[in-house]
Each structure stands twice: as C-alpha cells, then as structure tokens.
Amino acid sequence: MLADCIFRYAILRIVARIISMPTSTQEKTIFIIDDDEIIRLSCEQILRKSGYTVKTFANGYEGIERLKEVRPPLLVVDIKMPELDGFEIIKIVRKIDPDLVIVVITGYATIETAVDAMKMGAYDFLPKPFTPGELRMIIDRGIERWRLAKEAQLLRKQKEEAERKFVTLVSHQLKGPLSAVKQYLDVLLYTSKDQLQGETLEWISRSQARIVEMIGLIHDWLMLAKVERGAFSDRTVSSDLEKIIESVVREYRQLPAAANLSFHAELAPNLEKVQGDESSLNMLVGNLVSNAVKYNKPGGSVNIRAGKSGTWIVLEVRDTGIGMPPSFRQRLFEEFYRIKTPETQNIPGTGLGLVICKRIVDELGGSIEVDSKEGEYSAFTVRLPIANAKEVEYTKAVGK
Ligand code: ADP
C-alpha cells in the first residue's frame, strides 16, 4: 500500500515536472555569466538535471556576443566580476533583448547591490551560498514569467490584428452601399425636386445629411486605424509647411461654411522644412482649419501663424468662434469625444479629428496644445521638429 502511494507520488512529481518544463530548445536555454568556475559548473549540473540547456561564460564579453545570436529567455549573472561587472552587463543586454529575464548572483553582504540591479531591470536575485532547490525555484519561476510575457505579447498582437481586420472589413463594406444610397438620393433630388412635396423633400435632404455624416465617420475611423497601426506618418522625410498651409487654406475657404469667414496667414519668411510627410501634415493642418471653420461664428476669422522657435516650427490655428468651456478641454483628444452644447448640436462631426491630429503629432515627435475662451476664440498650437534641426543650427553657427 505504502509502496503504491510512493510510486504514485513519484509519477505525479515527474508529470508535474514535465508539464512545468519549457518546451522548445530556445525556451530551455539558460545563460550563466560568472567568473567563479565552481559556481558555473554546479549551476550547470543542477539545471541540466532539470532539463535545461545551459551555456556558461567566464566573462561578460563572450556571453553578450553569444546572447545576440541565441536569444535565451534567461540570464544568470554574477554582480561582482573583474572587467565587465554585472551592472554593465545588465545595461547592455537590456538593450539587446528587453524581454530577457535576468537573475543576479550576489554575496551576503551585497543585498543592496542586488536591489540596485533589480531597479535596473533584473527580475530576481540569488544570494550566495544558495541550495540547488533555491536555484531551481528561481529559474523555473523566471522561465514561467518569460513564457507568460511571450504569451501575453502574442495575444495582444492577435487582438490588434483581429481589430484591424474588423475595422477595415466593416468600414469597407459599409462605405460602398452608403455611397450608392447617397448617389440615388442625389439623382432623386436632381430629377424630381419639382414633383416632391415640402415634407418629402425635407426627409430626403435629412437622409442625405445623415448619410454624409456616416461616410465621414467611416472615413475618419479608417484613417485613425491606419494612423494607429503606425503606418501613416513618416518622420524620415521633410516637408514644406508653407505650401501645405497654402493648399489647405485654398481648399477650406471654398467650403459653404466658410463663405462669410476671412482667412489670414502670417508665416515667418524662409520657414524651414519640418520633419514629416506631406500627407500626414496635410491631414493635421486640414483637421485644425476645418474645425476653425466649423466652430466659428458668422463674419469670424481663421488666423494661421507659423514661425521658428529653437529647433521647432510652431504652428498656431486660431479662430474667433464659439470657443470651449474649460471643463471639456481635457477630453478633447479622446476618441469620439464631442462637446455637447446648444452651439455645437447642429454642427456635424465624428469626434475623431483631434485624436488623429494628436497621433500624427506624436508620431512626428511634436506636441499639440489648446487654448480657448468660451464664446470668444479657440487656438491650437502645434510644435513640430525642424527637419535636420542640428544641421540647420550647425550651418548657422559656422556661418556657412
Ligand atoms: P469633430 O469631428 O466633432 O469636430 P474633433 O475631434 O475634431 O471632432 O473635435 C472634438 C470636439 O472638440 C468637437 O466636437 C468640438 O466640440 C471641439 N472643438 C474642436 N475644435 C474646436 C474649435 N476650433 N472651436 C471650438 N470647439 C472645437
């Protein structure tokens, strides 16, 4: 009976070991960097018995070189070593692989240094002397953490991909039929306007307006999905902001809503190019100018200024419109957020324009701020890095 129990217990332990053991060779590889040969050999022996593949190194340089190729999930490193010490090694390997789990080995008297190492990104520490059980426990726990982090990363990627596919699929499938319905309504109004009763005419016009709103929402939603994927803005190229402002103003002053507004642009002479691609910058300036038109008052003005400040180009889009109550301002850059007041209730919009602006500015390495006084004005200030700012500064400094 007792023998049977012991046998079952032993089988259970083996099964538990197998389940908790990492699976692929890369997932089973542990690197040990320690100048103490005895520690290297004993750790290797203990961990091999637990099913790990162990690679040991007497110095940091060798270990780091191999780590670049093998990418093990876990590194055990001694803090006190001649030449490259544990702290320096942690700093270097963190840059090579931010997901690497690091366990530091430390002497009794240096618990504080272990704490410092953990602040630098080490996961756990093993004070000397340690038992085989303690070593196994910390390594198993570290490997489990690495596995869970990888699993979470994979799930996050899968979720993002599913969301992206959903947005694209739904939006494309909605856009086509909606555009077709809009065209039918356009044709109906064009061909039969005289025969339609006043009420019917109003219903058709309202339907048209709602469909235009929905098409706008899908357009902004698709745009946001694109910007969020990081596939939209390109900060490796430079663009002429002056040209972009001119073309945006030309486009927006033709809108029916801009009919009784005046536009003023005050641009510093020889404005340097900004970092970023034309299409993102067009969208950024376009959204701000479009809002300055939409939320303006009859007879109001849209004022655009751009100039240099240090290594930045500062762009301001200011209007003399309805402004915003202060309490609403913090939420302006949240998705689908629209200020609901009697003044805004008939103004069409999606609540995505400023979110798109913020993401573009973030991607281009700049910033966006808002200032406003309810009933008087709104002003959006965007700071964008000057293209090759260092080169420009250098050229000026040496007078070339
Ligand atoms: P929308 O499509 O609703 O205009 P935005 O993201 O561009 O979406 O703007 C969010 C909200 O911020 C708007 O609904 C509006 O209430 C407010 N807002 C944006 N720009 C201005 C402005 N120039 N003047 C007053 N309110 C503004």
Image (cartoon, grey):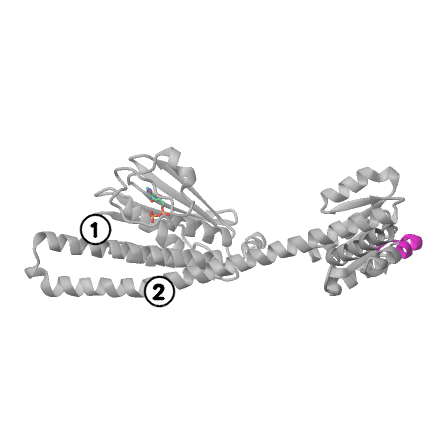
Q: Is residue 37 magenta?
A: yes
Q: Residues within 10 Å of mark 1 (few under 14, many from 20)?
A: few
Rendered location of residue 347, percent (x, y):
26, 46
Q: Quadrant of the C terminus?
A: bottom right
Which picture quadrant has residue 189? bottom left
**Residue type (three-letter) at the residue carrying disc 1:** Ala
Tag of residue 173:
2
Label 2 sits on a secondary structure element that is helix
Q: The disc labelled 2 sits on which kind of residue?
A: Gln
**Marks 1,2: beta carbons within 8 A:** no
Using a 10 Å C-alpha cutoff, classify the residue at mark 2 as few (fewer than 14 neighbours), some (14 to 19) or many (20 or more). Answer: few
Which residue corresponds to mark 1?
259
Q: Going 23% across and 50% down the picture, which residue do you hit?
A: 257
Residue with the most extreme right position = 38
In reply to whether residue 140 is colored magenta, the answer given is no
1 or 2: mark nearer the eye: 2
In terms of depth relative to the viewer, which is nearer, 256 or 2? 2
The region drawn magenta spans 33-42
**Is residue 182 visible in the rendered structure shown here?**
yes
Residue 79 at least partly seen: no
Q: Which residue is pictured at 26% across the width and 42% down the height?
A: 345
Percent position of residue 168, x then y? 41, 62
The image shows residue 185 at horizontal and vertical percentages of 19, 62
Task: Please tell me whether mark 1 sits on a helix, a strand or a loop.
Answer: loop
Depth check: 48 or 251 in front? 48
Q: Quadrant of ligand 1?
A: top left
Q: Is residue 68 left or right of residue 367?
A: right
Looking at the magenta stretch, what is its main secondary structure?
Answer: helix
At which x and y percent is residue 208? Answer: 21, 57
